[in-house]
């Protein structure tokens, strides 16, 4: 279970750093927007985040018993279904509708 808590903390660190990058990109969009919308800069950022994610995975212990894999996968699935159900109920079932502001993308 310690490995799961470690994985959760590493995921949260990755999400926080990604959110900080998002805020920086939004805040500097007026000056650097032409550079950050370029496909090469997006590809570089995507590869960097994937490499960071893999690097964070090296901190996990892979010598654990495999009987917990199904248990952990089941818990993750239940949490995901719960989050989806919460979102579905909070939006009154209108998950397919896209606002006009983002429909051009």
Image: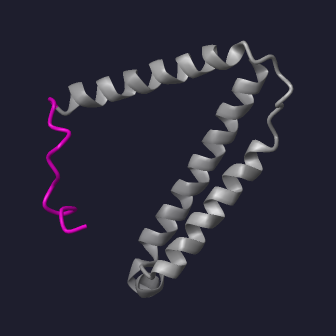
Q: Quadrant of the C terminus?
A: bottom left
Q: What residue is at 14 percent from the left and 46 percent from the top? A: 97
Q: Nearer the viewer, residue 27 or 4?
A: 4
Is 38 rendered above or below residue 26? below
* Residue 8 sits in quarter: top right
97 left or right, relative to 12 = left
The verdict on residue 98 being magenta is yes
Q: Which of 27 and 55 is in front in this view?
A: 55
74 left or right, relative to 14 = left
60 left or right, relative to 19 = right
Q: How many labels does the image show?
A: 0
Q: What residue is at 63 percent from the left and 40 percent from the top? A: 11
Q: Quadrant of the N terminus?
A: top right
Q: Please, what is the dominant secondary structure of the magenta stretch?
A: loop
Residue 17, percent across and down? 61, 55
Residue 40, percent across and down? 52, 80
Q: What residue is at 59 percent from the left and 73 percent from the top? A: 44
Is 24 rendered above or below residue 7? below
Q: What stretch is highlighted in magenta?
A: 92-105
Is 34 rendered above or below residue 84? below
Is 61 rendered above or below residue 46? above
Q: What residue is at 82 percent from the left and 40 percent from the top? A: 59
Give the colour scheme shown: one colour
Q: Nearer the viewer, residue 18 or 47?
A: 47
Residue 88, percent across and down? 24, 29
Residue 18, percent across and down? 56, 56
């Amino acid at each position: 279970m310690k490995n799961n808590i470690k994985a959760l903390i590493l995921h949260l660190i990755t999400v926080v750093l990604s959110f900080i990058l998002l805020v920086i990109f939004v805040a500097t969009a007026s000056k650097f927007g032409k550079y950050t919308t370029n496909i090469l800069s997006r590809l570089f950022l995507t590869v960097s985040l994937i490499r960071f994610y893999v690097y964070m995975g090296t901190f996990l212990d892979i010598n654990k018993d495999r009987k917990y894999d199904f248990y952990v996968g089941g818990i993750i699935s239940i949490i995901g279904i719960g989050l989806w159900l919460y979102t579905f109920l909070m939006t009154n079932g209108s998950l397919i509708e896209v606002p006009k502001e983002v429909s051009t993308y």
